[in-house]
Amino acid sequence: MGKIILLVLCGIIGYLLGSINTSVITGKFYGVDVRQHGSGNAGATNTLRVLGKKAAIMVVIGDVLKGLITCIISNSIAGQTGAIIGGAAAILGHNWPVYFGFKGGKGVLTSITVMFYLDWKISLILVGILVVVVLISRYVSLGSVLGAIALPVLTILFGRDIKLVIFSIALAVIIVFKHQSNIKRLLNGTESMIKL
């Protein structure tokens, strides 16, 4: 019973930290709600398009920190399982933030951060996939989706613990789900490219 309470605590902490959407907060300093511009997504890529590089860097830092801090705190409370629960909750908080009407980003940066904490070797491969795809195609969404699909495949191929495999499958489903509109635009040839 005590273990369950600790895991629930990790989930609550993760969700509340994850709900701190740095894209929306950064936009307030510019007097702009990024959710009303560009793709409408409250994430780093749309912030880059709408507000520029400096604002996007602030979002990247914020998204990475909340994932990292959540995992560190949750791990100290309930070990790896706590980090998985807390990390998952942080990603859900980022995507559906309680502070901002449950309208957030797509969770890619926070997801990558959580995965790095849990398994840096697999995460390096995923970042490599993301970077190569983006450099070739100039579509961040395509790199994110392909990286998400590769995640559970890699955890299975590397023989990781069942908890991490289940987490990676759930994470892949969430990321692909959040990229539905991007996938449609990719298929229609109307997805926005980034400038390199």
Image (cartoon, grey):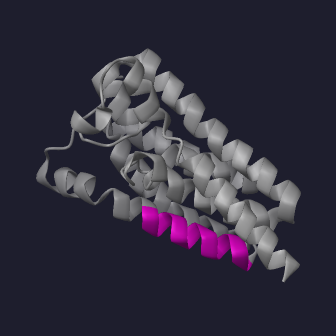
Percent x, y of residue 66: 64, 42
Residue 38 seen in the figure: no
In the image, residue 45 sits, relative to residue 6, either above or below, namely: above
Percent x, y of residue 101: 37, 51
Percent x, y of residue 47: 36, 29
Name the magenta segment's main secondary structure.
helix
Residue at 32 percent of width and 40 percent of height: 139
**Magenta run includes residue 32:** no
In the image, residue 163 sits, relative to residue 122, either above or below, namely: below
Residue stretch rendered in magenta on the structure: 162-174
Residue 24 occupies quadrant? top left
Residue 54 occupies quadrant? top left
Residue 154 seen in the figure: yes
Residue at 54 percent of width and 42 percent of height: 20
Residue at 65 percent of width and 68 percent of height: 155
Percent x, y of residue 42: 37, 40
Name the side, left or right, on which 57 lies relative to 145: right
Name the side, left or right, on which 9 lies relative to 48: right
Quadrant (top left, top right, bottom left, bottom right) of the C terminus: top left
Q: Residue furthest bottom?
A: 1
In the image, residue 54 sits, relative to residue 43, either above or below, namely: above
Name the side, left or right, on which 61 lies relative to 59: right
| Number of marks | 0
